[in-house]
Amino acid sequence: MKYDYVVIGSGISGLVSGIILSKQGLSVAVLEKAAQPAPLLRGFKRRGIHIDTGFHYTGAFAHGEALDSYFRYLNIAEDLEKIPYDSECFDSFYFTDDDYSFSFPFGYERLRDRLCSAFPHEKKGIDSYLHTVSEEFNRSPHLNLDISSNNIFMYDPYSSQSLKSFLQGLISNPRLRSILSMHYLLYGTEPGRSSVSVHAQVAGSLYSSVHGIKGGGRTLAKTLLQRLRNLDADIFSRSNVAKVMVRAGEFQGVELANGETVQAKGCISSIHPRALLPLVEETAFRPATRQRFQAFEDTTSAFMFSAELEQLPEMLSRKNLFLCPDDDLDTYCHLERAIEKRPFFFASAGLENEKSRPGMIMLCPASMQEMYPWRDSLPEHRPESYLEMKQALMQRVHDHVLRKVPAIHSLTMLDCATPLTFRDYANAPSGCLYGIKQKYGQLNPTPLSKIRGLYLTGQALTAPGILGGTISAFLTCGVILGQQKLIQEVRKCR
């Protein structure tokens, strides 16, 4: 088999990259080692309830905004039904230590009014914070399509400042600092280490608009895959890449675990940078490159619990809930915290049909270290002790939710995904949710590798989520096709 480009991995960045290249008339093959393409994005079903694992909601998706424009360029926008979230409260933060709640609206003016009403002595700091987030969000040509693409690789001073130090310089109230930082759970790098710039990219998109998609990640995955097929791209499941073939510093093709080879002029790897290293012969990358990739610290992993509800509470109707144990956000992911002392993100789960009962997803930080006794097990062969551990966790979370969230009167636990689940199904070495940490002052990977014809894409390069993964694909394909050319084509689709 021979193609112009082969894409390793079928997450959001891999699928979008495949569509972009195919739209340019290039022949493309997408290789996925799992039994089905887009395994994390598509989620799974339990008792007629669709459990989203890779997509819950997104920002910057209103008409004419960045994600909407990208999806129009990909010719998938008309096949996706947007679900607008509650503009007065798309996220609710509930601090259990002192029974305090804050409802987070979207729209900068609405958000400013809500924050200033709750914290009237912090108006100056609130204005400075919102101004910086808006300015940072709009300085990126991939988020603000009206500015020049020449700014893409320009130095950003806010990439060298931590979110924690930035907020400490503006705001004295620790609870307000916590509220403004809490969305770090959506990108997995604690405020003391995450950069202001990555926070602005994630939070700024939500401050503009918030939407879901009818059918969730499953519908998005199906739509992307169908678009690829319509463009005559080939999608291969159960195609585990065992080796990236390189000769004289130039990409030649890939060898699969079954011994087959796929030749191509170029390759886009959408897998974790550290997972790519074993696939490339040691001499192909310089020792410094290998050491840098190995040294990158991963974002947090998670336990993801799914449950069936008798009735969907109003607090999860076009909105989400963050259950916050206290204001010490930098220790939220520490193993010393019992699961009842960790933060939880609650979101509604999609119904398979009208007869199904509503469902709920609960995510809380976890670490691969907690999975040490079962680290060598595979999905089809987990030991009984692993299953017992999951059942015990599910019972504890069941009891914790009923104690702390009165709006939920009863729930039936359905399943629990662990860091091992994310490791094995998302090809993330540590089970991380969002690739490597976007730490302040850190030099992150770029789309260009030292091997000619081999390019990188994914959350590690830009930002997490559907928006971040989509932008990463456009950034990588822009290196191949020309940034200005690609962005101009996207602009025409608005």
Image: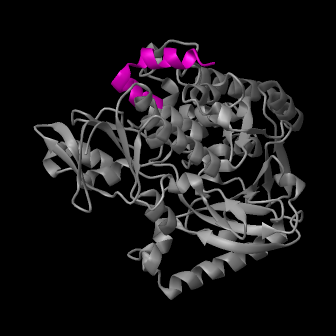
Q: Quadrant of the N terminus?
A: top left
In the rendered image of this protein, does residue 193 appear above or below residue 363? above
Magenta segment, principal secondary structure?
Answer: helix
The percent position of residue 157, horizontal first and vertical second, equals 49, 24
Decide which of 77, 415 is in the foreground and name it.
Answer: 77
In the rendered image, residue 10 lying in the magenta stretch gets the answer: no
Q: How many marks?
A: 0
Q: Tell me which corner region of the image, top left, top right, bottom left or bottom right, holds residue 198.
A: top right
Residue 29 vs 170, above or below: the answer is below
| Type of colouring | one colour
Specify whether 449 is left or right of 489: left
- Could you tell me which residue is drawn at 71 percent across and 45 percent down? 178
Q: Residue furthest bottom?
A: 384
* In the image, residue 476 lies in the stretch drawn in magenta: yes
**Residue at the farthest left position:** 248
The percent coordinates of residue 275 (x first, y second) are 34, 54
Q: Is residue 46 left or right of residue 261?
A: right
Let me know if residue 10 appears in the view. yes
Residue drawn at x 36%, y 22% as measured from the top left: 481
Q: Where is residue 172 drawn, in percent x and y?
A: 73, 37
Q: Nearer the viewer, residue 352 or 142?
A: 352
Q: Which residues are magenta?
A: 474-494
Any part of residue 194 in sight: no
**Residue 464: image x %, image y %?**
54, 42
Quarter of the image where one finds residue 113? top right
> Which image quarter is the C terminus in?
top right
In this picture, is 438 found above or below 255? above
